[in-house]
Image (spheres, helix red, strand yellow):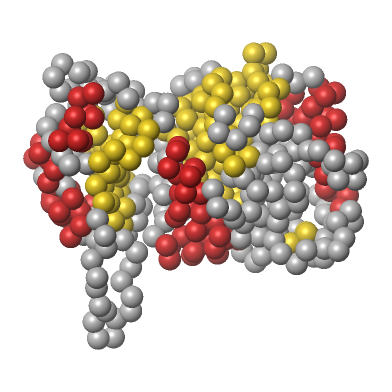
Amino acid sequence: MRIRRLGWAGIEIEAAGGRAVIDAVTAMPQLAHIIGPPRTELLPPAGPVDLALVTHLHEDHTDAAALAAALAPDGILLRPAPAEGTARETLDTAAAETGLAEHELPTMVVEPWQSVSAGPFTATAVPAVDGLGAPQVSWVVEVGGRRILHCGDTLFHGHWWRIAQRLGPFDAAFLPVNGAVCTFPHLHPASPFPVDLDPAQAAAAAHLLGARIAVPIHYDTLHAVGVYEQIDDPSGAFTTACDELGVVSRVLDPGGTLDLPAGKGDAGNDRTAVDSTAGHSLPMTESNADPEHILDDLLAGRPGTLELTRSLTSAEPLRALPEPARAHEAARVVGDTDLDNTGSRRVMAAAGMRPAGRDAHLAYYESAWPPAPCLPGPGEGAEPEPVAVAVAVAGAVEGVPSTQAG
């Protein structure tokens, strides 16, 4: 899976021969009259789009003309429900609604927790809260065993835990970070509070979601004093807040890309240890497959989330992993495998991992423990946040073909 940032909140996803976009816009004519022209690039997708998703129908997230130009002949647009109310109450979504109707785009309204497949992609709408009251969803997109979450320009809310429990783990979460305060002509009196996540809230959301990588979106493109004011240095404040929580962050300029190697369904038995803090991959061979050796090499001195992906045909290496993981201040060991891969599920169960949920494709397992009490030594501050270790396990057991789980 390759994800390219298109600017503002827009991203493009390429995987398995397909292309999807979320909140892809190339123009914001009405907002330009109020706020001024976009201050950063707004890039179009690189080719025909099989699946287009919009989180909500504000002009800076739904560009009907751009979507009409990008959609493949058999492509489809998924969107949340229309806003309800008087013309004044629905003013901020009216232009996008009119544009979608004029372009006669193939469109489907999707409710929270509803999943739709198009091409190689499966998209699931999840709850979000719009700062101006419009219907909004966030999108979980899965392809090739990788799963990402795109959060539009949501406010902070109480659905993070349920989203993580039902659809996690997430390889990457794309979160708005500009914490903008709006003073629009049709909204009086004006609210003094941000209409989307600020950097600290976005980092906290990534932490609650257990995202392996957190990417800031929705910043710098729009800013006008007294009308639409973002906080100072949103992306820098976000990376600082992520560092404080032990969340791995990655800043992408418009056109920048994030590559996520394919997970579930990988061919062969390649074994790879991925230090997602450094973005570095090391081969795992039989000689270095000892859990203590792995953690000494890859975890010590490198705070962040560590993902170990390998094929296992025995529960012994996995059963041995929690003790050294805990010694390295890890919070838990988590694993996932295909629902139909009974061999891998037996391996994890035999290793003492307990079921932690499932979705349409994967079963999740975990070994967790309460954090050990620790008092700081003389002159020392509080202990750092525990490091989460994710172990993706698959193998050939009792005749079950081996696959690589993501």
Residues 345 and 25: in front is 345
- Residue at image x 63%, y 32%? 111
Q: How many marks?
A: 0
Could you tell me which quadrant the N terminus lies in?
top left
Determine the residue positioned at 54% across, 48% down: 159
Quarter of the image holding residue 83? Answer: top right
Residue with the most extreme top position? 73
Q: In the rendered image, is residue 214 in sight?
A: no
Q: Is residue 279 above or below residue 312?
A: below
Q: Is residue 304 left or right of residue 47?
A: left
Residue 313 rendering spot, x and y as whole percentages:
14, 29
Left or right of residue 287, residue 43 in this image: right
Q: Horizontally, is 249 left or right of 59 in the view?
A: left
> Residue visible at 60% across and 21% down?
50
Which quadrant of the figure contains the C terminus?
top left
Q: Which residue lies furthest to the bottom in this view?
A: 378
Give the camera-side residue of 95 and 251: 95
Q: In this view, does 199 lie above or below 2?
A: below
Of the pair 70 and 326, the residue shown nearer to us: 326
Residue 211 at x, y percent in the picture: 43, 47
The location of residue 367, given as percent across then percent down, is 24, 47
Q: Where in the figure is residue 396, as x and y percent of width and height?
A: 17, 22
User: Could one spot residue 38 in this view of the protein?
Assistant: yes
Residue at the (53%, 18%) spot, across then down: 119
Dividing the picture into quarters, in which one does residue 304 lie? bottom left
